[in-house]
Image (spheres, grey):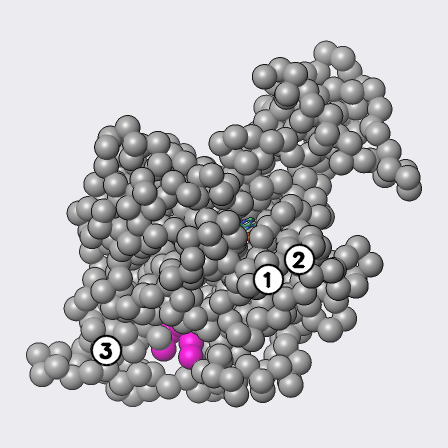
């Protein structure tokens, strides 16, 4: 189905269709159906803005027409870097309708990341915002454009400065759909439902087919630079539908997006898109701060929210200080990094809602504790795969099944787990087995009841409270500094974030310290969360038996040092 990445073999396509996982839906069609069924219901709430399903549907068509006018076509890649603002949804649904692929960047990404994503995906356009959280994205966009010659358009929401205005790109006239009026131009006073546009793959103007790539999501990265993850309409919509079921979402659900909504967790587990699938309302928070979020939960009567463990800790502390719970919130999902059992046990009594642990990955597999699980499962495990068709293996270092209940490498295959990254054949050969299992890089064990407990990581990545840092990417930046002979980054334990990063440096110049290296990385345009939290200068690296740097020993060294300092 695509030359850019390995697709599921035919027998699996058949299996996933027959099992009812892949139902031939597309995002464009899904929104059209929801707008027809309950157009007046709120889809998105952000600040003072409330967008109904009908408005979102219309906005997506108008913007799709405008983007098409700029020359954006089916299959084109468009980097989308937007924070939690309603226009994010106009943009992604417009691109979905065109069959153009959003390439999701996070708001914290800077020049280094955006240049990489834009060049790797050979993006036609970059859509961002004027200013947000004190940062001017227009300046970033100018720098990116200068470095990525293939990038034809930069569109900016708000005041565009030197770039194109996103708002002015929306077409005023909606093109007729196959000779008919747009559903919203039909006389709605008679309660006429829209005709759902039938996708006609193959015809020049048809939208994407269900098996087509819908977007590219960003991997956390371990070796080299972060990879792009191709997700199809079929597979992603299945993951939304199944997530919405597992999390009990329906038309009355109100999902609070407190994490950046382009990340896979708040986007799809069940996240904003799962909520729209279920016909509920997505409430966008600008930050996770209790000052903003606690009143918002009450005002909008949010029923479910998703956070990473450090944010859960902040909410627990704030609730205690204020003597409040999160009422009327029913479910607090915690995922992205390991949530300690100790903190997990506090959620229900102190926040007054059910905890749901979520262990997922942008590559696919998502595990949930179920809302009616025993308390010991909810607080002590990371749940189990959401789909009966998910296949999970726990293997030893030699790829043999680990003894039941023991820790091993987690591998997975299933109806919403990719078979390969985008344009990365060499990396795919390492990250996937010949029979299509994805090597997650996580170390896990399975309880007798079939729940997974994450016990660590084999991949060279740091999980800084949910923010993933591929160490090799940062080491390579450090090696570009003239004083750095070699660099090895490892995690160090941290009570709040779970882990922070420590860079061990072999230096050529005793005068170059951590401050200089930190500002060097910032000047190279690296996102702040990737900049090492600590630098240690040493004379030589400990080696493994085969002469590689022993990161295990470096981790032990920094952990011991932290204990001494405590
Ligand atoms: C331990 N480690 C976890 C957890 C993710 C839902 C939820 C999270 C993500 C996500 C996601 C963990 N305990 N509860 O995409 O849809 C670590 C693992 C995993 C990696 C994936 C979703 N939840 N992790 O975090 O692609 O190491 O997705 O392989 O950012 O995060 O990271 P990412």
Question: Where 344 falls versus 171 (above or below)?
Answer: above
User: Mark 3: which secondary structure?
Assistant: helix
| Residue marked by disc 2 | 405
Q: Which residue is mark 1?
A: 448
CA gap between label 2 and label 1 equals 7 Å
Percent from the top left, x then y, of residue 259? 40, 46
Q: Which quadrant would the N terminus be assigned to in this image?
A: bottom right
Query: Is 422 left, or right, of 216 in this rendering?
Result: right
Q: Residues within 10 Å of mark 3 (few under 14, many from 20)?
A: many
Q: Percent position (x, y) of residue 139?
A: 45, 37
Circle nearer the N terminus (2, 1): 2
Marks 2,3: beta carbons within 8 A: no
In the picture of the structure, the residue carrying the numbered disc 3 is 36
Residue that appears at 31% across and 40% down: 350
Q: Is residue 182 left or right of residue 102?
A: left
Label 1 CB-ligand 1 distance < 8 A = no
The residues colored magenta run 25-29
Quick check: marks 2 and 1 in contact, CB under 8 Å?
yes
Residue drawn 22% across and 69% down? Answer: 54
């Amino acid at each position: 189905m695509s030359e850019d990445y390995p697709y599921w073999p035919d027998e699996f396509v058949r299996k996933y269709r027959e099992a009812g996982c892949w139902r031939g839906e597309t995002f464009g069609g899904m929104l059209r159906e929801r707008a027809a069924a309950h157009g007046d219901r709120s889809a998105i709430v952000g600040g003072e803005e409330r967008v109904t399903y009908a408005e979102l549907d219309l906005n997506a068509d108008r913007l799709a027409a405008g983007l098409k006018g700029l020359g954006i076509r089916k299959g084109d890649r468009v980097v989308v870097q937007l924070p939690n603002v309603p226009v994010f949804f106009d943009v992604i649904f417009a691109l979905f309708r065109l069959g153009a692929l959003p390439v999701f960047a996070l708001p914290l990404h800077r020049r280094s990341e955006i240049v990489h994503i834009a060049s790797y995906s050979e993006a036609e356009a970059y859509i961002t915002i004027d200013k947000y959280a004190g940062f001017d994205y227009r300046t970033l966009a100018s720098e990116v454009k200068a470095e990525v010659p293939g990038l034809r358009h930069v569109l900016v929401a708000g005041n565009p400065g030197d770039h194109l205005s996103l708002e002015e790109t929306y077409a005023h006239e909606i093109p007729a759909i196959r000779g008919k009026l747009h559903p919203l131009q039909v006389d709605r006073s008679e309660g006429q439902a829209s005709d759902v546009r039938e996708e006609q793959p193959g015809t020049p103007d048809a939208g994407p087919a269900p098996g087509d790539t819908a977007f590219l999501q960003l991997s956390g990265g371990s070796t080299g630079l972060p990879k792009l993850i191709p997700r199809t309409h079929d597979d992603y919509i299945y993951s939304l539908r199944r997530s919405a079921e597992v999390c009990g979402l329906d038309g009355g659900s109100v999902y609070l997006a407190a994490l950046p909504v382009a990340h896979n967790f708040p986007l799809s587990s069940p996240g904003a898109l799962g909520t729209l699938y279920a016909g509920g309302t997505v409430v966008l928070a600008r930050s996770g701060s209790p000052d903003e979020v606690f009143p918002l939960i009450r005002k909008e009567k949010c029923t479910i929210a998703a956070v990473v463990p450090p944010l859960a800790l902040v909410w627990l502390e704030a609730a205690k200080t204020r003597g409040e719970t999160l009422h009327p919130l029913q479910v607090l999902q915690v995922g992205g990094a390991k949530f300690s059992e100790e903190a997990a046990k506090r959620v229900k009594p102190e926040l007054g809602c059910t905890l749901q642990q979520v262990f997922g990955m942008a590559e696919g597999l998502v595990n949930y504790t179920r809302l009616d699980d025993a308390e010991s499962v909810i607080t002590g495990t990371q749940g189990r795969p959401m789909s009966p068709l998910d296949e999970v293996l726990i293997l030893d270092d030699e790829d043999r099944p680990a003894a039941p209940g023991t820790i091993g490498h987690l591998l997975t295959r299933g109806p919403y787990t990719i078979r390969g990254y985008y344009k990365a054949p060499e990396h795919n050969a390492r990250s996937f087995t010949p029979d299509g299992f994805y090597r997650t890089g996580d170390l896990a064990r399975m309880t007798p009841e079939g729940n997974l407990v994450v016990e660590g990581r084999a991949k060279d990545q740091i999980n800084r409270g949910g923010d993933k840092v591929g160490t090799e990417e940062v080491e390579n930046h450090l090696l570009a500094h003239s004083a750095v002979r070699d660099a090895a980054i490892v995690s160090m334990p941290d009570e709040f974030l779970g882990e922070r990063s420590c860079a061990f440096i072999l230096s050529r110049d005793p005068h170059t310290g951590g401050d200089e290296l930190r500002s060097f990385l910032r000047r190279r345009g690296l996102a702040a969360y990737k900049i090492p939290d600590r630098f240690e200068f040493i004379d030589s690296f400990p080696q493994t038996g085969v002469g590689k740097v022993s990161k295990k020993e470096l981790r032990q060294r920094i952990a011991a040092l932290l204990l001494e300092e405590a």
